[in-house]
Amino acid sequence: MHQGPFAATAFTVANFYRGPADHTWLLVYAGATRDLATGATLNGAVRIYALPDPDGPLTEIGTYSPKHSRTAIKIIRAESTRLILMDGTGHTFAFNLDTDRFTSARIRTTTVGPHR
């Protein structure tokens, strides 16, 4: 899916996630908001829609942007009801689908030492 239920001139989709949160199925589009006059990227953002009924219409929940993100963001993984996102400069963010808030992402890395 390369575009969501909105104009491509207003929001560019990098990727998306579909999954449950708070007893509702959500569609989360990661990408960037765009200036309607120039088409330039304004900031990274996620747009969230609820799908309360599989046969019903989507309900828009909102558009959320992490602070200081001026490039498109993409989802790099889902952890339960938390999405880990990265912008074009390599900064990572976490978005909590239950609270609709961004936090800093603590990415766990594992260093493998020499075998003995």
Image (tube, rainbow, N blue to C red):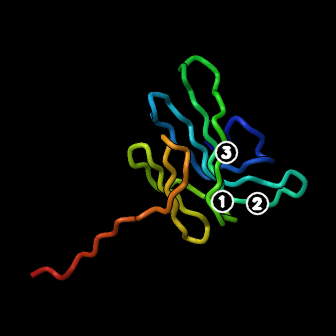
Question: Quick one: which residue is furthest to the right in this view?
Answer: 37
Q: Is residue 73 above or below residue 100?
A: below
Query: Spatial distance from mark 2 to mark 1, Cα to Cα?
Result: 7 Å
Whole-percent x, y for residue 59 in the image? 64, 28
Amino acid type of the residue that numbered disc 1 sits on in the rendered structure: Ala
Amino acid type of the residue that numbered disc 2 sits on in the rendered structure: Thr
Q: Tag 1, which secondary structure?
A: loop
Q: Nearer the viewer, residue 87 or 65?
A: 65
**Quadrant position of the N terminus in the picture:** top right
Whole-percent x, y for residue 4 in the image? 67, 39
Q: Tag 2, which secondary structure?
A: strand
Q: Point out the tag, 3 or 2, that comes first from the N-terminus.
A: 2
Q: Residue at x 73, y 53 (%)?
A: 33
Q: Residue at x 66, y 33 (%)?
A: 60
Question: Quick one: which residue is furthest to the left in this view?
Answer: 116
Please report contact status of discs 3 and 2: CB closer than 8 Å, yes or no.
Answer: no
The numbered disc on residue 63 is: 3
Task: Find disc 1 in the rendering and name its residue.
Answer: 72
Please report contact status of discs 2 and 1: CB closer than 8 Å, yes or no.
Answer: yes
Relative horizontal placement of residue 2, taking residue 78 as reference (left or right): right
Q: Residue at x 78, y 54 (%)?
A: 34
Whole-percent x, y for residue 105 in the image? 46, 62
Q: Residue at x 57, y 56 (%)?
A: 74
Q: Tag 3, which secondary structure?
A: strand
> Marks 3 and 2: which is nearer the front?
3
Q: Nearer the viewer, residue 88 or 24?
A: 24
Task: Find disc 2 in the rendering and name its residue.
Answer: 41
Q: Quadrant of residue 61?
A: top right
Q: Residues within 10 Å of mark 2 (few under 14, many from 20)?
A: some
Q: Residues within 10 Å of mark 1 (few under 14, many from 20)?
A: many
Q: Quadrant of residue 49?
A: top right
